[in-house]
Amino acid sequence: MLQGLSDLGHAYLGFLNVTTLAYGLGGAFVGIVMGILPGLSATLAIALLTTLTIKLQANDAILVLICSYVGALYGGSRTAILLNIPGTAANAASCADGYALAQQGQAGRAIGIATSGAFVSTLFGVLCLAAFTPTLAEVALQFGAFEFFWLALFGVTMSGSIVGDDPLKGWLMGLLGLFIAQVGQEGLYAYDRFTFGWDELSGGIALIPALVGAFGLAEVLTTLAHPVERKIIDLKDSVLPRFREVAQYWRTVLRSGVIGVLTGLLPGVGEDAGAWMSYAAAKAVSKERDMFGKGSIDGLMAAETGDMSSIPGHMIPTLALGIPGSAPSAVLMAAMIIHGIQPGPMMLIEHPQFVYQVVAMTSLASITILLFGLFGVRPLLLVLKVKRSVLMPIVFLLCTVGAFASASRLFDIYAMMAIGIGAFFLRRRGYEMAPLVLGLVLGPLLDKSLRRGLVLSDGSLAPFFTRPISIAFATVTIFTILLYVPAFKAVVRGITGAVGRGLKHLFARRT
């Protein structure tokens, strides 16, 4: 424990220099801007910045990405409050009370409450990140090739619920990502697969062009196809929150912080789930539940606290197990891999300081959103006056430059455009891109682990089902898939309901 505290202290001290602070402020600023603009997301912010930071040192690049992640989710609350349009999906729960307060002439007060809640909840999540990630990663060090196979397969299974309401579409996109990951020379014997005699495909589909195409170009095409212009509500009051007003909702902050972290720990449950569950919990216990949806400070605080605390929660399984819990954390994990850091059980051996560096990065990100949130409100809102027809060509240019800059290959631009155009039409049919990225990221791990396991077992599948951790992951993976079968789900509900009624009856008799 003392060693962990020492490492954490060194991580914080390592960020106390002008260059690092500038990177953090810059990343948060870009993230907030992307979050403020309706339709642009934290996922897109991380994907674009991954291309722009490819030449930076790993720590500096990941700092920029984490700050943009936190900034984008925070920035989305601005449009939720002022336009009644959530900047990101996670800010949807903030619309009802935030916009109601803005219509009452309290837009500044609502932004101040959202800012203070976001700051405090992110710090709470950081404490959980520092406490739980090393412990979980140490347990995961017992994994071998057989366990890694099931871990990767479980991650792909989560693509059914990581975004969207249709698990079948999520699984199809995850499988498509797995297929794309197999293109090129395989990892053990460098044998060409699915190249069809095309030499450029021997190197595979690079991760950066795939990310930029799936999120960047597809978003540009989607936005230009459906332009939306709304008039914002003017800020007439102060955005500086009153300490007493924030302090009286400490129970809401603590409760929503715990809910946000717990939902973040569950792979496939996004930041929006943390916000809605926190909002529902606050409404259930609030003395002013009639005010919810009409301008409740308690409701707004719960929504913003729940979604922001889920960010560190998502980072825990991402770092310790290599299983991202949401679309932005999936892209963040891909960026870490690009910069030579493989999240998962081996990370504590290969990069033992990295967990504490991520803790320090997230802490810095929370401080930057507090600064921008309280002292840069009006300048940042000017971004909403930029027309989409002007902004989207700039984003497309960044996508093109980013795809080419990663390896200086013209083929990567073609790959980015092909994936982006395909993603645009798939999104119109309700297929989300986060499962595709998840399949791309976990595909090499699943492929290598399967074949290494078969080599170690002389072709036998038995160790995949007989080793203790393997059989546990296999059971959870199969059970997760079966839960989407209506008949099986009904049986499980019947059993759990019967057990619950039995326990309730038993306790009733004892009392």
Image (tube, rainbow, N blue to C red):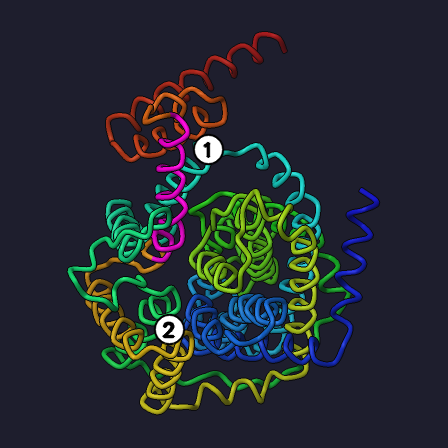
- For the N terminus, the image quarter is top right
Callout 1, which amino acid? Glu
Question: How far across and down, in percent of the image, does residue 236 sit?
Answer: 60, 86
Q: Residue at x 64, y 72 (%)?
A: 369
| Magenta highlight on residue 18 | no
Q: Which residue is mark 2?
A: 39
Q: Residue at x 46, y 45 (%)?
A: 267
Q: Which residue is mark 1?
A: 147
Assess disc 1: are there few (<14), some (14-19) or many (≥20) residues with their C-alpha within 10 Å of its C-alpha. Answer: many
Range of magenta residues? 437-457
Question: How far across and down, in percent of the image, does residue 481 sit?
Answer: 31, 34
| Magenta highlight on residue 456 | yes
Callout 2, which amino acid? Gly
Residue found farthest to the left: 196
134 or 484, nearer to the observer: 134
Q: CA distance from mark 1 to mark 2?
A: 38 Å
Say which of marks 1 and 2 sits in front: 1
Question: How far across and down, in percent of the image, does residue 286 sit?
Answer: 60, 49
Q: Main secondary structure of the magenta part?
A: helix
Assess disc 2: are there few (<14), some (14-19) or many (≥20) residues with their C-alpha within 10 Å of its C-alpha. Answer: many
68 left or right of 374 in image: left
Q: Residue at x 20, y 59 (%)?
A: 195
